[in-house]
Amino acid sequence: MGVTDTSGVSARFPEFPWDTLAGAKQRAGEHPGGIVDLSIGTPVDPTPDVARDALVAAADAPGYPTVLGPESLRQAAVDWLERRFGITGLSASQVLPTVGSKELIANLPTQLGLGPDDLVVFPELAYPTYEVGARYARCQVLAADSTVAIGPRRPALIYVNSPANPHGQILGADHLRKVVEFARDCGALLVSDECYLEFAWEGEPVSVLHPDICGGTFDGLLAVHSLSKRSNLAGYRDAFVTGDPAVVAELLAVRKHLGFMLPTPVQAAMTAALADDEHVTQQRERYASRRADLRAALTSAGFTVEHSEGALYLWVTRGEPCRDTIAWLAERGILAAPGDFYGPAGARHVRIAFTATDERVASAVQRLTA
């Protein structure tokens, strides 16, 4: 195989989802009022001053950072988890900063040493990187929402995501307790993607590390958190993983060898952002307003909204194939994410992000209700 041969990539991975939206994006861009891009949940509001000020103050950073990061950062994460979500018993040594949460999820099976003999399970409707990371490690993969669907197989790694991307479903405490029990019984590592835990609109999300869920022990459990959405820090690429101390230590050892480290100024910004809740409250208010306006407009246009209890998306359907809905929206200058990005179960839904500016959201509302 030559160094420019990419045939192996196409065999191992599906087509990059957003590449399939090129035609719809072009059509939406032809609208006289310009495109309203609601396809990707990227923050557009300002990065909070508390993070920017900390970044600038730490800008003189001539030396290498460490993979583990300073104790002040890790303790800020521990304090935030206890303050906001009632998670007790964690220590700073159980927190590992990561270069965004997508990087961690994409590399996790490989960094844990999983391979062709190992099964990775993820939700039937799921963030594509769970599967991509498993395939990158050449693991077996299974999309399943129940232990019945897993059957007698013994997974090595199980992902849960609540509030969930794409559909915003919040998993209840009873459900999470059963998943924790199942994972421990079969010896699987349970990884809970909790990047949207700050954004619940209906219902109350809970972490798998909460004592009522984990039974007071973090054995076999990891929780992944990101500041991209919480603090509008997607461009900073800062997140962290915490939980089972033995697994965190193993990941730290591997990542030291591979050089996965956050820049020193980013570590400082992350520390400051975790210690401040006010900017998150303000951001939730922005998103709540946009969500309410878009939801009302979509309902008036004949869409049915399903789940969407949390996260930054509305999961909607017109009772037709999702690509037909994408074309309908594109005619009105609106770009959304087709549900089949997230698995066959999404074939008749689309995901509408409410992370666009107030002006763009207002434009979308006008077009939907015209």
Image (cartoon, grey):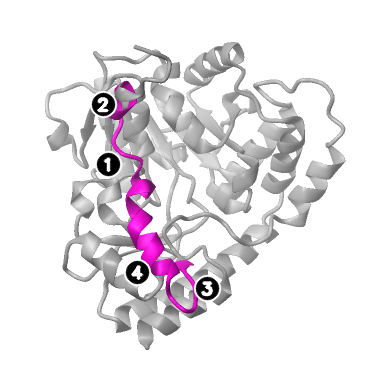
Q: Which residues are magenta?
A: 8-36
Q: Which residue is mark 3?
A: 360
How many angstroms separate mark 1 from mark 3 (CA)? 31 Å
Dot 3 alpha-carbon crowd within 10 angstroms: few under 14, some 14 to 19, many 20 or more? many
**Tag 2 secondary structure:** helix
Q: In the image, is residue 48 above or below residue 271?
A: below
Dot 4 alpha-carbon crowd within 10 angstroms: few under 14, some 14 to 19, many 20 or more? many
Place of residue 246 in the rendered image (x, y in percent of width and height, measured from the top left): 49, 16
How many angstroms separate mark 4 from mark 3 (CA)? 14 Å
Q: Residue at x 57, y 76 (%)?
A: 359
Q: Which residue is mark 4?
A: 330
8 or 117: nearer the eye? 8
Residue 189 in view (yes/no): no
Q: Which residue is mark 2?
A: 11
The quadrant the N terminus occupies is top left
Of the residues under marks 4 and 3, which one precedes in the sequence? Answer: 4
**Tag 3 secondary structure:** helix
**Tag 1 secondary structure:** loop
Place of residue 182 in the rendered image (x, y in percent of width and height, measured from the top left): 25, 30
How many angstroms separate mark 3 from mark 2 (CA)? 38 Å
How many angstroms separate mark 2 from mark 4 (CA)? 31 Å
Q: Residue at x 35, y 35 (%)?
A: 130
Of the residues under marks 2 and 4, which one precedes in the sequence? Answer: 2
